[in-house]
Image (spheres, helix red, strand yellow):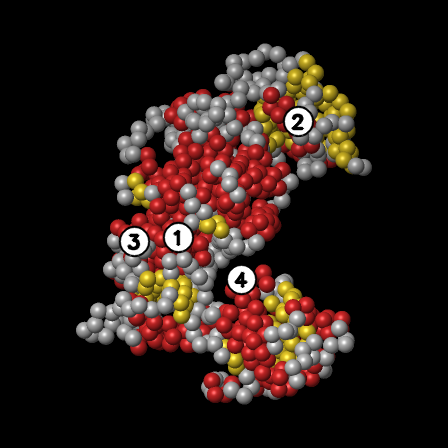
Amino acid sequence: MKGPTKRTLVIVLCLAFALSGAAGMFAAGQKEAPAGETAYTLGINNYMDSFEFCFKVHQNIEEWAKKYGIKTVYAEAKMEPEKVKANLDTFAVQGVDAIFEFNWLTEVTEKWVKDNPGIVMVTGDYIVEGAYYFGANQYQAGVVLGRHLAEQVKKRWNGRVDAMVFAACYQCGPLLIQRMDGIRDGYKETYPNYPEDKIFRFENMGADGQIVNTKRIVTDFYTAHPEMTHIVVGTNNDEGGLGALSAVETMGNQENFFIVSHGGDTPFREKIRAGAGKVWIGSTAYMPERYGEFMIPWLKDILDGKDVPKEMSPEHFVLTAENVDQYYPND
Amino acid sequence: MIPTIDQDCVLEMRDIHKSFGGLKALDGVNLDLRCGEVLGLVGDNAAGKSTLMKILTGFYHADAGSIWLDGKEVHIDSPKISKRLGIEMVYQNLELCQNLNVAENLFLGREIQRDPVFRFLKLRQMERKSVEILRKLKIDIQDPRKRVDRLSGGQQQAVAISKAVSFGPKMLILDEPTANLALKEIGKVLDIVMQLKEHGIPAIFISHRLDDVFHVCDRIFVLRGGHRVALKQSSETDHDEIVRYMFLGAGEESSRSA
Amino acid sequence: MDEPRSAGAEPVRRRAVPGFLRKLSSSGEILSILIALIILCVFFSLTSPYFLTIRNILNFTMNTSILGIMAAGLFIAMVIGEIDVSQYSIVALSTAVMVISIRRGMDSGLAIVMSFGIAILCGVVNGSLVAFLRINPIITTLGAMMIYRGIAYNITQAKAMGVTGGFFEAVGSGRFLGIPASVYIMLGLFLLVHVILTYTAHGKRVYAVGGNAEASYISGINVRMVRFWGMVASSAAAGVAGLVFVSQVGATVPTVGEAGLMDVVTAVILGGISLSGGKGRIVGTLIGVLILAVLQNGMVLINVQSYYQLMVKGVVILLAVLVDSLRGGGFK
């Protein structure tokens, strides 16, 4: 490459760099506080925006922080322990008052909290000693779902359930297991005598993905138990629900199944709007798009020194074909 | 490091045979190298020159025949043994490390070390000795810390030859030493080869450039199709005759030693 | 090409300028990435009031020391012409075994030595496959990476595990003259690599094999062993990095490095190494490590959105390569 051409290219690249940096700065989250107020600063250490759930959480927190006059600074760590620590340290240098940490690395955050006692730490969807907890109450979400299930069983099946098939990521840890236990316990509030040996648990996380695995689990189970005609399938997320629905539709016996799942996310809403609501009777909403709404006011109270509980969760309720338009009119 | 003149005859390869599968590469070749001489080895591409040299440097084993060094029979089973016997070769692609400097290349594999464990180098000493080695062959490279890839082709060739010579070898094999050089550099390299004579190191000079062969070689050995087709004193022959031997073979008797 | 001067050689010139300064100024590659680093620092200090503070600088050098330590070891392997992508997996595995053992009652000191030993063992495996069985180093370390990672997942059930202890406290939080212990470890390792590569025969042979393995072999160098030790050096560095890692985050995390896998290689390449081997200066790797650290830290400070961060990183790397090529360098 000739000298002048090279030089031009270098200049162009320098400009590109400068521009991208400047553009990045302008596109950055809101930094200015309303005049006259000493604003708090919240550091958000996210997993990554390209993960839809985390993206919604991030957006909503920023929105509500702005409403409450809280400045934000943002970083991502992609669950990399070194990056988590580095980002937290950088937040500390910038003098943040609180941090919302969303990378689910319990030990790493715990150590950092011990080493940095002056900053309010709120961990999202995972529990750390010494920090505040905001996030789903997995168990409660399950209970609400179980109650709804019991209602439907009473109304449409006269209280008969031949089997409960739980297809979930059991290796994902205790929190996800609570989702399933919650379903059982919520159901048993209405039907306390439902026998334990009619609950069948299957691991659905694997190389093929939860959708495919769940479909296979449901299909195989039904084939192995042709005498059963009232089967409940419970999954820990909407992917599992999709798999179960696919199995039921393929087998063509919608009247034999109820599907309940966690998540209340787009795939679920699409399916029940398309008419699957009689089988897929409900999914608990986790509402990542309302995390900020619930968290920020509570955080402000913490920062103001008020006496508040150390845990907070968004409201959990069951999304169904009947109420989906009410909660998500803009889908 | 550079030996004084040695009066005994140096190398004799007797009746060497080598085949690869069905192909006979060498068929009863006899070669001798006398002290103080430069022997030119010429022949076209399939003549068997490199096979013969590979046997001498231990990369191949002859199927039949024997090799004699200083009047004693030797068995060259590996390159290591060949080196130990004092046979050094300067390869066509030089085998220098372009990313290292002159001194480092000269001492490659036998660096001057302070201790055997950590192997800390005596860099100054290496550099001083390098200058000495180069001076002995009248090579004018001033700075031994200069990286080899900054040297001209001729200078690199000079370094490669110095490296081979600095081991104090009994004999040297030079494989196409002037092949890729500019005209004015060729002269310098040939001067170095002449220096070898002065230091009493006999050499086998492989080249397709007959001008150079006639310039430095005392005798010329022509190989064709695995046979020796001529062995002449360079003063008693000329280009045309050698070319005829190379491409047409022996019209007359092949083994006429001078 | 140079004109050879006439005979009548001058004596070797005395070194009027201190050796390292002369080397630095004569090396265009180092200068160009140093310029890139300085530009970055200037940029961030202008755009964020926090960047050029002592606290921040100490922070990001401390937090990059894990990467830096691995880069120092990888550098040796890459000069030889090899590569190693299994370092982070070795961190995962060696620290997993160490933490599990400590939790089961093993003496910390013993566990730490064992952790390092496991890293060396991984290096022996890598080195044997690359040097003796002559399997391509990329393929070897890709496969090894998955195996080591898999074992780490297995024994930890994919869960992070915390650990405490005097050693980890000292390395993680200890400071001497205000500078964190991990920074000393990183700089110490860089210095060690520099000394070995510049002043010992071991080091010269590393460059020799990287530059021309055939010539080295013909000169009597045991090329296989050099390649072997190159891979061991890389994993030994990973072993040390693992100890620093556990000290800093207080736990073994089996997923460590999965997203940042190529960062170590990027840092070394940024530092001006030749991909085919034989060329490169360890100080360049240090600068490369610092460039990545400054980038990561600076972009968080000025709140650059995540989508831009990757782009900016790429532009910087291209810039460094281009400036270097302007000076006549470039990959051969």
**Whole-percent x, y for residue C59 in the image:** 33, 51
Q: Is residue B212 visible?
A: no
Between marks 2 and 3 in the image, the one whose residue lies nearer the viewer: 3
Between marks 3 and 1 in the image, the one whose residue lies nearer the viewer: 1
Classify A109 as above or below A161.
Answer: above
- Mark 3 highlights which residue? C56
Residue at image position (53%, 74%) is: A143
Mark number, residue A321 = none
Q: CA distance from mark 2 to mark 3?
A: 60 Å
Residue at image position (57%, 13%) is: B6
Between marks 1 and 4 in the image, the one whose residue lies nearer the viewer: 4
Q: Residue furthest left?
A: A36
**Whole-percent x, y for residue A214 in the image:** 65, 70
- Mark 1 highlights which residue? A111
Classify C276 as above or below B13.
Answer: below
Between marks 4 and 3 in the image, the one whose residue lies nearer the viewer: 4
Q: Which kind of residue does numbered mark 1 sit on?
A: Lys
Q: Nearer the viewer, residue A97 or A87?
A: A97
Viewport quadrant of the N terminus of chain A: bottom left
- Mark 4 highlights which residue? A174
Between marks 2 and 1 in the image, the one whose residue lies nearer the viewer: 1
Label 3's element? helix
**Whole-percent x, y for residue C72 in the image:** 44, 43
Q: CA distance from mark 4 to mark 2?
A: 66 Å
Q: CA distance from mark 2 to mark 1?
A: 61 Å
Residues beneath discs 4 and 3 located on the same chain: no
Residues beneath discs 3 and 1 located on the same chain: no
